[in-house]
Image (cartoon, rainbow, N blue to C red):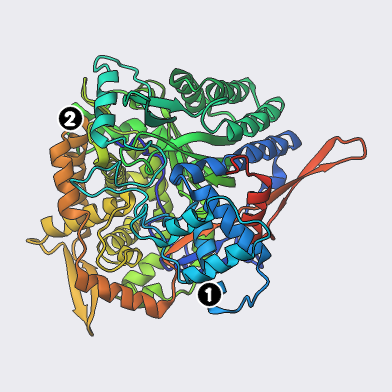
């Protein structure tokens, strides 16, 4: 099962967002959110509000933590595909040295391709996982390589990788019935390793009676030894990726003196111990300390965390987010955390699958200071960690919502014409304008803070029992929990919403997105493959089918266009509750067959006629399907004696300049 239950993908980055009633407190002003636009991507900037209100020690702590974050970039690139770093170096050399016509069709296509590769951290699309198809000619690339002062070793092989559609066509393959390892391009498995061999290897390692299992395979590459037997090569100092881990550890050590308290100091030192040893028991000790620290204002994640890029959902991709608590906005997440037991007790799932005592659920709204690795340039809007079920049950979990990121999405979406094109009527459009920003954020809060932390596995159930479908089903479970409770009067009672109809804004957006508008991210003829997209499609399509007799959700044709109409919001909530109960049963009992059947029936296949319509309508709007970010940059300010007197944050760096700087200054894994 994919243990990566931490990141909620931005479900509606392209949704119109003129939220007059519940808009973010700080308006856009003169801040330029848009940094670049190319292919199917818009790159944005994000603010780091209130950074100057941090103490000097907190600012310095953020500085060294963000340096530790930036040094991990190469790890992710290499994890994504074995030739990514060599291809990146080749493309960047050509781009920097090109002395021809930069307005020519071939060069403009080359530039777009390079920007796509930067954005995806490799040669495969960050969402579809398909290898990019260059729009420039092979001859152009070969000519540019020949023009380099020194041709890089293996350049011809790299050209073949780029242009041959048979080589590494899919970064992560999730097709039912395929060998998911041999058909995936990720560099987490060595040559000749098969899915069955890996599953058998870990099955032999696991003890079903172990109440505190480690996260098997989290920080290793699986290869075959000289005798053809499976073995693990750990990511650690002195081991795989040691050259990149060394500067990460160096900057973590520099951060230690500026820790806000002893608990935070112990967290950083424990992470250093894990990077040094590669021992997963040490990682669990670090995770427990991290989950239990609720006092520190500055916080971070750093390491091998998300496992969506592993076709078997075990190995974590490297990522980091450095952040600090948004104290005023955290009120709503603190209220949710304080009522966690009530939500668990009143969940519509079978009592056998509920936690008798919810422990240590903490939540906050944060301001992201830096995004790195698998959280950059595309980033989650919410995080819930640790991933290990036994740690969550015994020690609790920590959830965050990245509100300065959602604000950037919101500001960038103003006036994009989405509502006029896809929302069925003015009344619904006004509902979205008034309440979508707050209900979208509340949905994220509920998803991360309570959804992922809810429920329990029955004794003896393998946390990985749902295998390749685990990520989709876990995100489905958390989304359903959030959707179900978003309409509960409890949110009015505890002061998080002021209108009992506010939840309808999120319900409408969710069904519209799951059934229709997210299809703009899919190429014609392709299936839905990304876990979050499958999750949303599963929920929307299941609710549509199971509410047909009562006409809960209707697909209305008007002037040749399809619109979603929700006729009974209360009944829709009931459907969400029914599906939540079933998904929790599947999760708690490890019912792989039932989970697989739900995913394959509702989450994968696309209606080609509806798909074409959605693509045509989006084309008229000129809205980028995907959005991501450039980071701010940080600079130490020192006096004449070399003492740090301040840390300055700057927002002016352009996308291309940032990517070139990162490749120059943070490139420990040179190929």
Badge 1: few (under 14), some or many (20 or more) residues near its Cα, within 10 Å? Answer: some
Q: Residue at x 59, y 30 (%)?
A: 296
Whether residue 188 is visible here, answered yes or no, is yes
Q: Residue at x 46, y 74 (%)?
A: 416
Q: Horizontal placement of 485 versus 111: left or right? A: left
**In the rendered image, which residue does mark 1 sit on?**
106
Task: Work out whether mark 1 precedes mark 2 in sequence or the reverse, and give the earlier one.
Answer: 1
Work out whether residue 94 or residue 414 is closer to the camera in this orientation and state it: 94
Q: Find residue 470 and report its horizontal and vertical position in percent.
A: 27, 39
Q: Horizontal placement of 294 versus 14: left or right? A: right
Q: Find residue 98 and report its horizontal and vertical position in percent.
A: 65, 68
Q: Residue furthest bottom?
A: 559
Q: Quadrant of the C terminus?
A: top right
Q: Residue furthest right?
A: 640
**In the rendered image, which residue does mark 2 sit on?**
589
In this rendering, is residue 93 above or below 376? below
Q: Find residue 563 and report its horizontal and vertical position in percent.
A: 24, 73
Residues at badges 1 and 2 in contact (C-beta under 8 Å)?
A: no
In this rendering, is residue 452 above or below 96? above
Disc 2 secondary structure class: helix
Work out whether residue 291 or residue 466 is closer to the camera in this orientation and state it: 466
Q: Quadrant of residue 351?
A: top left
Tag nearer the camera, 1 or 2? 1
Numbered marks: total: 2
Q: Quadrant of residue 545?
A: bottom left
Disc 1 secondary structure class: helix
Q: Residue at x 37, y 36 (%)?
A: 189
Task: State the separation of the CA atoms marked 1 and 2.
Answer: 55 Å
């Amino acid at each position: 099962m994919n243990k990566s239950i931490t990141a909620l993908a931005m479900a509606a980055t392209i949704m119109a967002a003129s939220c007059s009633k519940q808009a973010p407190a700080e308006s856009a002003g003169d801040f330029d959110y848009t940094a670049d636009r190319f292919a199917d991507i818009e790159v944005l900037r994000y603010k780091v509000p209130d950074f100057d209100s941090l103490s000097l020690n907190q600012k310095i702590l953020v500085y060294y933590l963000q340096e530790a974050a930036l040094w991990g970039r190469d790890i992710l690139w290499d994890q994504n595909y074995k030739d990514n770093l060599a291809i990146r170096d080749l493309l960047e050399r050509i781009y920097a040295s090109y002395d021809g016509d930069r307005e020519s069709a071939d060069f403009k296509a080359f530039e777009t391709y390079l920007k796509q590769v930067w954005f995806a951290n490799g040669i495969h699309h960050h969402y579809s996982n398909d290898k990019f198809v260059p729009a420039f000619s092979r001859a152009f690339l070969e000519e540019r390589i020949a023009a380099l002062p020194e041709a890089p070793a293996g350049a011809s092989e790299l050209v073949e990788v780029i242009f041959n559609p048979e080589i590494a066509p899919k970064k992560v393959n999730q097709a039912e019935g395929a060998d998911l390892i041999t058909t995936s391009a990720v560099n987490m498995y060595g040559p000749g390793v098969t899915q069955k061999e890996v599953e058998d290897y870990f099955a032999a390692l696991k003890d079903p009676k172990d109440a505190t299992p480690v996260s098997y395979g989290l920080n290793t590459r699986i290869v075959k030894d000289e005798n053809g037997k499976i073995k693990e090569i750990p990511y650690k100092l002195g081991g795989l990726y040691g050259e990149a881990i060394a500067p990460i550890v160096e900057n973590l050590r520099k951060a230690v003196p500026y820790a806000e308290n002893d608990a935070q100091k112990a967290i950083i030192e424990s992470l250093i111990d894990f990077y040094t040893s590669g021992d997963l028991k040490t990682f669990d000790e670090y995770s427990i300390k991290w989950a239990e620290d609720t006092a520190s204002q500055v916080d971070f994640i750093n390491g091998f965390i998300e496992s969506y890029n592993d076709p078997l959902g075990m190995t974590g991709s490297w990522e980091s987010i450095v952040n600090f608590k948004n104290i005023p906005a955290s009120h709503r997440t603190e209220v949710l955390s304080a009522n966690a037991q009530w939500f668990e007790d009143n969940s519509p799932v079978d009592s056998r699958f509920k936690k008798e005592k919810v422990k240590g659920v903490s939540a906050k709204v944060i301001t992201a200071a830096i995004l790195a690795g698998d959280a950059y340039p595309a980033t989650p809007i919410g995080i819930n960690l640790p991933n290990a079920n036994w740690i969550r049950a015994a020690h609790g979990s920590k959830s965050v919502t990245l509100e300065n990121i959602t604000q950037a999405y919101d500001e960038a979406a103003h006036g994009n014409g989405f509502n006029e094109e896809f929302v069925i009527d003015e009344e619904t459009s006004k509902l979205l304008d008034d309440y979508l920003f707050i209900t979208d954020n509340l949905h994220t809060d509920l998803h991360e803070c309570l959804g992922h932390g809810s429920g329990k596995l029955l004794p003896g159930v393998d946390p990985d029992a749902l295998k390749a479908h685990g990520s989709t089903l876990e995100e489905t479970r958390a989304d359903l929990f959030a959707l179900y409770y978003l309409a509960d009067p409890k949110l009015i009672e505890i002061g998080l919403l002021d209108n009992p109809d506010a939840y309808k804004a999120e319900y409408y957006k969710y069904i519209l997105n799951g059934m229709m508008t997210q299809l703009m991210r899919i190429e014609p003829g392709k299936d839905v493959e990304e876990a979050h997209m499958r999750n949303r499609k599963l929920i929307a399509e299941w609710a549509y089918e199971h509410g047909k007799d009562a006409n809960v959700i209707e697909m209305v044709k008007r002037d040749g266009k399809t619109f979603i109409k929700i006729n009974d919001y209360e009944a829709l909530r009931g459907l969400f509750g029914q599906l939540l109960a079933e998904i929790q049963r599947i999760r708690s009992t490890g019912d792989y067959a039932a989970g697989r059947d739900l995913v394959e029936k509702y989450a994968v296949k696309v209606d080609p006629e509806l798909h074409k319509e959605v693509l045509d309508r989006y084309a008229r709007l000129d809205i980028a399907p995907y959005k991501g970010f450039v980071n701010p940059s940080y600079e130490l300010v020192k006096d004449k004696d070399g003492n740090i007197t301040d840390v300055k944050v700057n927002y002016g760096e352009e996308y291309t300049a940032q990517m070139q700087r990162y490749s120059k200054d943070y490139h420990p894994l040179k190929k």
